[in-house]
Amino acid sequence: QITDIHTLIQEGAQALIVNPVDSAAIAPALAYAASKNIPVVSVDVAPSSGKVYMIVRADNIAYGQNSCKYIATHATSSSGHIAILEGDLASLNGQDRTNGCIQYLKANYPQFQIVQYATKWDTPTAVSDARTALSTYSDLRGIYVQWSAPEDGILAAEKAAGRFTSVGSSSHIVLIGNDGVPHEHALIRAGQLDATISQPANSYAQYAIFYAQQALEGKTYSAGQSTNHNSMIVTVDGNLEDALPAPIVDKTNVNDPNLWGNNSQSNS
């Protein structure tokens, strides 16, 4: 990725939109872009060091907080274990989702015991870890998987272990993911997946391009500034971020036509 950024700048790129693979390791590339006065917009993943013009993503701490609040408030018991299937902790997204979840549960539902599994966004690892949690904890009340890809495998693992029950059943293990893709909506409608966070993927693309254009025009922004698209400019590790809204999706709103996962383009 660093090599690609050097190459693009050498080939005449005037602005860059970057999705960092590693939040810390992207810093040298950002420094090189800054030395050439090339503005960079970071989309989906925030850098943990280095300077960018704008970060375009949702509040990933809120992802974790809202996901684990959902588990705690929908669990069939007020105590037991909650498993977190973490993304890559080299990514600020993975760090924020984990920290948001743990901080929320410890502050508001300390009677739940938290078990963490580091998956590095690897689906087979996440499914294997879910199997481990299912076999280890008879009082498993919920599973928070930080992205959508492992959900089918987790559901299959629950069925193989004889622990699957439909959403709302008395012995149900709450399962919530993060993404808001059409397949998750189908699982919610079928009563298999409790909920997900609708990551605003279409808005990521739209506003990444918007801010790249704004940078080239010399426009400036400041923390605390509200936008015309229901978000706020905040500060993340010394950079400005347009913190886009990311609603919870469950059976109460899964058919909302405003969700990007329900638009015809996403489903085609």
Image: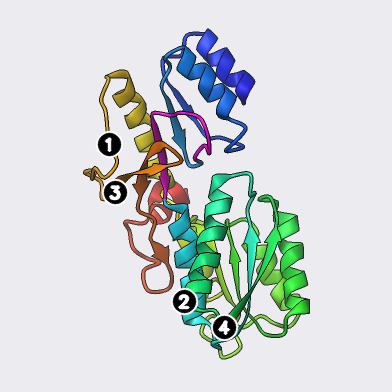
Decide which of tag 2 and tag 1 comes sooner along the chain: 2
Residue 254 magenta: no
Cβ atoms under marks 4 and 1 closer than 8 Å: no
38 lies left or right of 116: left
Cβ atoms under marks 2 and 1 closer than 8 Å: no
- Vertical placement of 186 versus 205: above or below? below
Q: Which residue is mark 4?
A: 111
Which type of secondary structure does the marked residue at label 2 adopt?
A: helix
Which type of secondary structure does the marked residue at label 1 adopt?
A: loop
Q: Is residue 232 visible?
A: yes
Q: Is residue 195 visible?
A: no
Q: CA distance from mark 3 to mark 2?
A: 26 Å
Pair 4/3: label in front = 4
Q: Which residue is mark 3?
A: 231
**Amino acid marked by disc 2:** Asn
Q: CA distance from mark 2 to mark 1?
A: 33 Å
Q: Which residue is mark 1?
A: 222
Query: Within 10 angstroms of label 2, few (less than 14), some, or many (20 or more) residues?
Result: few
- Residue in the image at 52% along x and 21% along y: 31
Decide which of tag 3 and tag 1 comes sooner along the chain: 1
Pair 3/1: label in front = 1
Q: Which residue is mark 2?
A: 108
Q: CA distance from mark 4 to mark 1?
A: 40 Å
Which type of secondary structure does the marked residue at label 4 adopt?
A: loop
- Span shown in magenta: 46-58
